[in-house]
Amino acid sequence: MSKKNAESQAGQTAPGSKQGNNLIVYAVIFIAGFLSGIAFSVYKTGGTPSANVASQQQQQHNQDQQTEQAIINLEAEVTANPDNFENWVRLGNLYFDSNQPEKAVPAYEKALELQTGNANVYTDLGVMYRRTNQPQRAIEAFDTAIEMDTTHIPSRFNKGIVLYYDLDDGPGAIASWEAILKIDPEAQLGDGEHLHNFIDRMKAQLAQKQSE
C-alpha cells in the first residue's frame, strides 16, 4: 500500500507496488485514513519529544526524502519514456503512498491507456478517485475491475466502502461485501475480524440509521 488503499477502509500492497488481491491488506488504508486525525493527539504540546519519538520522526523524514527522490526519478523516466506501463504504475503508487491523489489519478489513467486489462490498477485508481471527491468515478473503476476479474476481492470491498460512506447506498454496500464471502467465505479484515462479523455490524448500523 508503504500504503495502498485513504479515507475509510481499503488497501495497500508490497513495497513498490500497490497492486494485490488481498482483502486483509486492502482493509488497512481506509481505516488508517479514519484514524490519521486521532494519531496526532498522542503527541503532547510543548516539551521535548522522547528519544523514541525523535527517532521515529527522523526515520519518517528519511523515508519521505527517499520517496520524494524516487518520484523525481520516475517523473524524469516517464517523460523520457512515456510508453512504459510499469513506470507509470510505479509513479502512481508513489503518489498514492505520499498522499498526492491529484497526481496519482493521471498517472494511473496513463498506465491504463497503455495497458487496459489490469484490475488492480483500476482498483487503485478508484481509491484515488474517492480521495479526489469523485465517488461515482470510483464506482465505475471498481466495476471495471470486477468485470475484468470476477474473483477480485479488493474492488468489491472498496466499492462497498464508497457506496456506504459516500453515496449513501447501504444496501448496495452490503451486497458488494456479501459477494466477497461467496468468493472467500473465510475473508478477514486487517485486524483479524471475520468479514461476516463486519457485515453484521454494518447491517446493524444501517438499520439504526433507517429507524432514526
Image (spheres, rainbow, N blue to C red):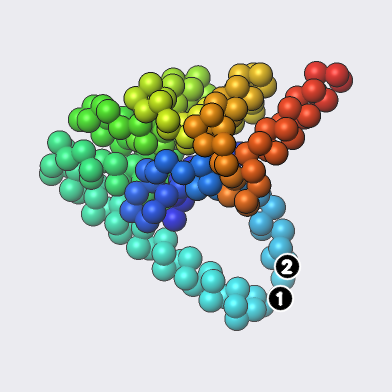
Q: Are marks 2 and 1 in contact (CB under 8 Å)?
A: yes
Three-letter code for the amino acid on which mark 1 is drawn: Gly
How many residues crowd around disc 2 within 10 Å: few (fewer than 14), some, or many (20 or more)?
few
Q: Quadrant location of the C terminus?
A: top right
* Residue in view at x 44 percent, y 55 percent: 2
* Side of 56 where 92 appears, left or right: left
Along the line of sight, which residue is nearer the eye, 57 or 162?
A: 162
Is residue 201 positioned above or below 40 on the image?
Answer: above
How many residues crowd around disc 1 within 10 Å: few (fewer than 14), some, or many (20 or more)?
few
Is residue 86 positioned above or below 42 on the image?
Answer: above
Question: x, y percentage for residue 121?
Answer: 35, 35
Asked where in the image residue 79 lies, by quadrant, the reply is top left
Three-letter code for the amino acid on which mark 2 is drawn: Lys
Question: x, y percentage for residue 131?
Answer: 51, 34
Secondary structure at numbered mark 2 = loop
Q: Is residue 158 visible?
A: no
Question: x, y percentage for residue 53?
Answer: 60, 73
Residue found at the far right of this picture:
212
Query: From mark 2 to mark 1, how far is it between C-alphas?
Result: 8 Å
Q: Which residue is mark 2?
A: 44
Q: Is residue 58 visible?
A: yes
* Side of 93 where 99 appears, left or right: right
Secondary structure at numbered mark 1 = loop
Question: x, y percentage for residue 160?
Answer: 58, 28
* Residue in view at x 54 percent, y 29 percent: 182
Q: Which residue is mark 1?
A: 47
Residue found at the far left of this picture:
80
